[in-house]
Amino acid sequence: MSYNHDAPGGCAQCPLLLCPQFYYTGNTTEDDDFSVSTLLQKANVNLGKNFDDPLVLFGDIAVPTGLQNADPCTARGCLWPKASDGNVYVPYRISNEYCEY
C-alpha cells in the first residue's frame, strides 16, 4: 500500500505524524494475548525495587511505607560525614561585611 503525501487531501500541509491515513487503529494480537492485570504486572515489574519506591502489593497497589522523608538526601546518604568522634563538623566562614552591632 502506498500513500501520496502531496495529493489533494494527502496531508501536504501538515507534518507526517499528524496524517491519519498513516496510522492503523485496530487491535494487535499482542494486546489480545494478555489480561489487564497481566499487562499491569508487566508494566510495574520494576516498581518497589529501589529504596525510595513505594511498596507495591498485588502487582498494582502502591502502599506508603511510612519511611518517606521530604528531604531526598536522607535516603541517598548525601549528608555531612561524621568524624571519628561521632560529631558532624560543618565548615563555615563569617564574612567581613558583618559588624559587632
Image: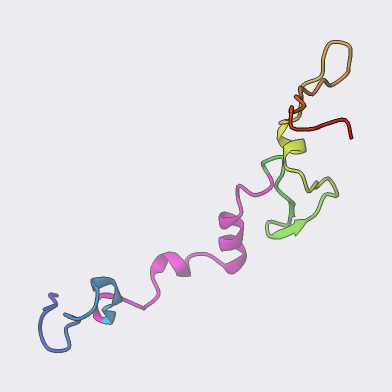
Foreground pick, 14 / 47: 14
Query: Residue 33: percent from the left, percent from the top?
Result: 48, 65
Residue 17 picture location, percent across and down: 28, 71
Residue at the spot x=88%, y=18% of the render? 87
Above or below 22: residue 49: above
Residue 71, picture quadrant = top right
Q: 8 or 71, which is in the foreground?
A: 71
34 or 51, which lies in front?
Answer: 51
The residue stretch that appears in magenta? 21-48
Q: Is residue 40 above or below residue 77?
A: below
Which quadrant of the rendered structure holds the C terminus?
top right
Residue drawn at x 82%, y 14% as measured from the top left: 83
Verify whether residue 27 appears in magenta: yes
Does residue 58 appear left or right of residue 16 in this picture?
right
Question: Where is residue 99 shown, x and y percent of the image?
Answer: 83, 31
Q: Position of residue 67 (x, y in %)?
A: 83, 45
Residue 19 position by quadrant: bottom left
Residue situated in front as seen by the camera: 46 or 28: 46
Residue 1 magenta: no
Left or right position of 38 against 81:
left
All told, the count of numbered labels is 0
Q: Residue furthest bottom?
A: 8
Look at the image and tell me in which quarter the N terminus lies.
bottom left
Q: Residue at x 14, y 77 (%)?
A: 5
Is 86 positioned to the left or the right of 34 in the image? right
